[in-house]
Image: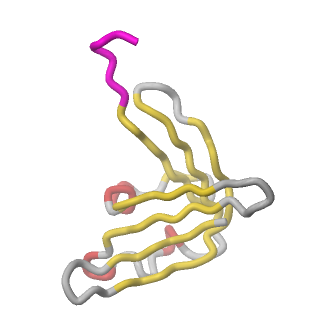
């Protein structure tokens, strides 16, 4: 690796075979991927939910297929997860913006 090489973490999310809308991707505040022997793989997305915009959005409706690719730019991303969206959990903190956690298994 040369000193001039730079690697930035990158991810893509597809729902039912199409990339998620740019506004949804820009709202992702954290992403967690869990995998293990004999355990169910799981992805959790935390979304900034200003104006409650994501609460009923069809792009992240339950039972839709979610695909996650991870890697470091500029290298190609690797698909690490395919599953179904199984839950939504909304939080409304006294101080701060509302958030929505979307989980897929």
Q: Quadrant of the N terminus?
A: top left
Q: Is residue 13 magenta?
A: no
In screen coordinates, is 34 left or right of 57? right
Is 3 situated above or below 105?
above
User: Where is residue 75 shown, x and y percent of the image?
Assistant: 47, 25
Q: Which sits in the foreground, 72 or 1?
A: 1
Which of the 4 quarters of the picture holds residue 43?
Answer: bottom right
Q: Is residue 3 magenta?
A: yes
Q: Which sits in the foreground, 95 or 77?
A: 95
User: Where is residue 69 shown, x and y percent of the image?
Assistant: 55, 44
Is 9 situated above or below 102?
above
Q: Residue furthest top?
A: 2
In screen coordinates, is 22 left or right of 61? left
Which of the 4 quarters of the picture holds residue 22?
Answer: bottom left
Q: Residue furthest left?
A: 95
Q: Residue at x 50, y 71 (%)?
A: 102
User: Where is residue 7 shown, x and y percent of the image?
Assistant: 37, 28
Q: Residue at x 45, y 76 (%)?
A: 57
Q: Residue at x 61, y 67 (%)?
A: 104
Q: Which residues are magenta?
A: 1-7
Prevailing secondary structure class for the magenta stretch in the rendered image? loop
Report the number of numbered marks.
Answer: 0
């Amino acid at each position: 690796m040369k000193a001039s090489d730079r690697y930035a973490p990158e991810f893509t999310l597809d729902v039912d075979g199409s990339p998620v809308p740019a506004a949804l991707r820009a709202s992702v505040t954290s992403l967690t991927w869990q995998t293990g022997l004999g355990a169910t793989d799981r992805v959790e997305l935390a979304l900034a939910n200003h104006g409650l915009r994501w609460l009923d959005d069809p792009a992240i409706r339950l039972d839709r297929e979610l695909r996650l690719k991870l890697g470091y730019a500029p290298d190609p991303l690797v698909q690490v997860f395919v599953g179904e969206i199984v839950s939504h959990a909304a939080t409304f903190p006294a101080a701060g913006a509302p958030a929505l956690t979307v989980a897929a298994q």
